[in-house]
Image (spheres, rainbow, N blue to C red):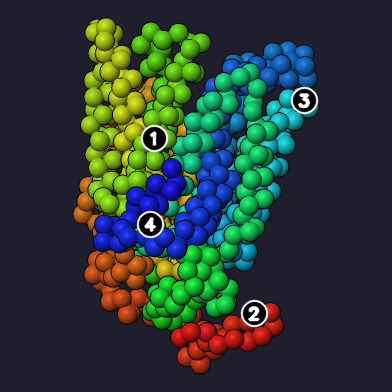
């Protein structure tokens, strides 16, 4: 599948692939698969794995409480503990998104993904031993630690993939994040079916990443622009691109650096104050907010009820729910296959547009389904259609855009902003949806249709197409809206911290490798 993504993503103008560059595809594919399997896969898995065994987890909570205190837990306390168990994952994710910037700055993209497995393994041990120890607190603690892992990985992985990918297939490889989230959701549904928590399995994904990822290079852009190590950056480019002559790629990165004139990473506050990237930041906030607030999480909450209304046996519903995970995965793969041909803009706007239509139909169907015998089946179709529409564009492209919008020094802070919006929105949906559903009943989905409409309208007027463009070309596309020339962007960006020209020249023209000073290409 990933081979098809890479090969099928080529722009028709550059469809000719040199047969000598097979190594190019192999290293990019292995890096994408390994990074995603140990990162976004675990995020998707932990989103869904608690749904099917919810009855058994609640039973475990009640039995533990009764064993400790000699009486059964009341329903309100049980509901509160269960809500905490589910929503605490988002709090951990927010923590991970906040701490990811200093981590990727100090350790690099690849090493961050590797070190992040410590959280995954610790969470797996806690959750898998919670039943043996008779401690539901261990399960809740494991969920929050797993959330930290997800918060770090959902920023570090798209950053890594965007920096190792040639611009011709940057979108397709970026979609690997979304695809493996969907695969993780599906596997969580499958492995959540038995009367076990299944959490010990997440350590397998972490182990695969720990074994394979160390043999792959660090991001060449990180090595060149932040570590000033030209030699290692060239070797990384050669490994990922499968060719000896990488001078063009190195020059492209250096061209970005000449515009920046400084490779010092900026803080979130500096990023938010930078006029030159104002509309990029706003666009990331809008897309990430709509990613969580567009109602897909609400669909997951409502699925069992709709299937029950359609006459499906309650014992069978968890197995029927697998169809939603399968549709989600197929739609995400399809998006990866066409993103470099159709572009980010039509897929993103089109996905939100289709969601609006199917939300409207679902509202009518749910409102009238008690009066017409076949309408519950239309509701099921609408659920599957909404999921597919989401995965076509909104499900993965926001991560791609965050990696494409910002220069090297701004990217960690940008992913921190995106991650914070993502996790706060995730938590808000989980917290507020029960009240929205209770107040509006079947009309609750009109709220999400309105959010999709607002997002699609904003993107229609603001979002430029980024397909097959360099980072500088994307910056130029926003320059007019930001009311600043491309040449002035970095001067504004570093106005308060600008170094002397002599210091800048010294910082960029030399790098230290194995104790030897080497001259970089300027």
**Alpha-carbon neighbours of circle 1 within 10 Å: few (<14), some, or many (≥20)?**
some
Q: CA distance from mark 1 to mark 3?
A: 37 Å
Give the Cα separation between the discs numbered 2 and 1.
Answer: 45 Å
* Residue 417 in the image: above or below residue 425: below
Mark 3 vs 4, N-terminal side: 3
Instruction: Tell us which disc is closer to us: 3 or 4.
Output: 4
State which quarter of the image contains the N terminus.
Answer: top left
Q: Quadrant of residue 445?
A: top left
Q: Which residue is mark 4?
A: 169
Residue 415 in the image: above or below residue 140: below
The residue identified by callout 3 is 132
Using the rendered view, name the quadrant where residue 271 is placed: bottom left
Q: Which residue is mark 2?
A: 513
Q: CB atoms at circles 4 and 1 under 8 Å apart?
A: no
Q: Residue at x 31, y 29 (%)?
A: 385
Q: Earlier in the sequence, mark 4 or mark 1?
A: 4
Image label count: 4
Residue 267: percent from the left, percent from the top? 50, 67
Taking 95 as reference, is 518 above or below it? below
Crowd rating for badge 2 (residues with CA inside 10 Å; few <14, some 14–19, many 20+): some
* Element class at badge 3: helix
For image coordinates 52% across by 57% down, the residue present is 27
| Cα gap from disc 4 to disc 1, whole angstroms | 19 Å
Nearer the observer, 357 or 224:
224
Residue positioned 32% across, 60% down in the render: 16
Disc number placed over residue 330 in the picture, else none? 1
Dot 1 or dot 3, earlier in sequence = 3
Q: Is residue 34 visible?
A: yes
> Is 175 left, or right, of 86 in this rendering?
left
């Amino acid at each position: 599948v990933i081979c098809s993504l890479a090969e099928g993503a080529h722009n028709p103008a550059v469809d000719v692939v040199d047969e000598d560059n097979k190594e190019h595809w192999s290293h990019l594919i292995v890096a994408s698969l390994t990074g995603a399997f140990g990162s976004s896969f675990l995020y998707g898995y932990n989103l869904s794995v608690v749904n099917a065994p919810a009855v058994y987890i609640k039973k475990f909570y009640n039995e533990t409480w009764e064993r400790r205190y000699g009486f059964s837990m009341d329903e309100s306390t049980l509901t509160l503990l269960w809500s905490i168990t589910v929503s605490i994952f988002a709090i951990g994710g927010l923590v991970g998104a906040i701490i990811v910037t200093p981590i990727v700055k100090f350790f690099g993209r690849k090493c961050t993904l590797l070190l992040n497995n410590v959280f995954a393994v610790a969470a797996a041990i806690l959750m898998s031993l919670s039943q043996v120890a008779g401690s539901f607190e261990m399960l809740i603690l494991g969920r929050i630690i797993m959330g930290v892992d997800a918060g770090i990985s959902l920023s570090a992985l798209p950053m890594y993939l965007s920096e190792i990918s040639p611009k011709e297939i940057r979108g397709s490889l970026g979609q690997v994040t979304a695809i493996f989230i969907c695969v993780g959701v599906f596997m969580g549904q499958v492995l959540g079916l038995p009367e076990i928590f299944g959490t010990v399995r997440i350590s397998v994904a972490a182990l695969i990443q720990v074994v394979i990822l160390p043999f792959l290079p660090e991001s060449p852009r990180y090595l060149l622009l932040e570590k000033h190590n030209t030699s290692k950056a060239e070797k990384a480019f050669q490994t990922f691109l499968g060719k000896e002559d990488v001078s063009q790629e190195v020059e492209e990165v250096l061209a970005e650096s000449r515009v920046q004139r400084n490779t010092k990473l900026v803080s979130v506050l500096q990023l938010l104050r930078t006029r030159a990237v104002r509309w990029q930041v706003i666009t990331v906030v809008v897309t990430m907010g709509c990613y969580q607030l567009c109602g897909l999480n609400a669909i997951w909450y409502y699925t069992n009820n709709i299937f029950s209304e359609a006459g499906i046996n309650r014992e069978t519903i968890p197995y029927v729910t697998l169809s939603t995970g399968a549709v989600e995965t197929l739609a995400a793969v399809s998006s990866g296959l066409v993103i470099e041909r159709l572009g980010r803009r039509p897929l993103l706007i089109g996905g939100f547009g289709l969601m609006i239509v199917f939300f409207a139909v679902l509202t009518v169907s749910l409102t009238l389904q008690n009066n017409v015998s076949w309408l519950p089946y239309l509701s099921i179709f609408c659920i599957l259609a909404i999921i597919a529409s989401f995965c076509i564009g909104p499900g993965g492209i926001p991560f791609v855009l965050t990696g494409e919008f910002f220069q090297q020094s701004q990217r960690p802070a940008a992913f921190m902003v995106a991650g914070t919006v993502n996790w706060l929105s995730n938590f808000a949906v989980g917290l507020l949806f029960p009240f929205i559903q209770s107040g509006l009943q079947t009309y609750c989905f009109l709220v999400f249709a309105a959010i999709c409409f607002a997002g699609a309208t904003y993107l229609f007027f603001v979002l430029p197409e980024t397909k097959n463009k360099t980072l500088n070309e994307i910056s130029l596309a926003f320059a007019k809206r930001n009311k600043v020339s491309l040449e002035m962007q970095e001067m504004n960006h570093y106005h308060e911290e600008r170094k002397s020209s002599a210091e800048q020249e010294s910082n960029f023209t030399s790098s230290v490798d194995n104790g030897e000073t080497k001259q970089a290409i300027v």
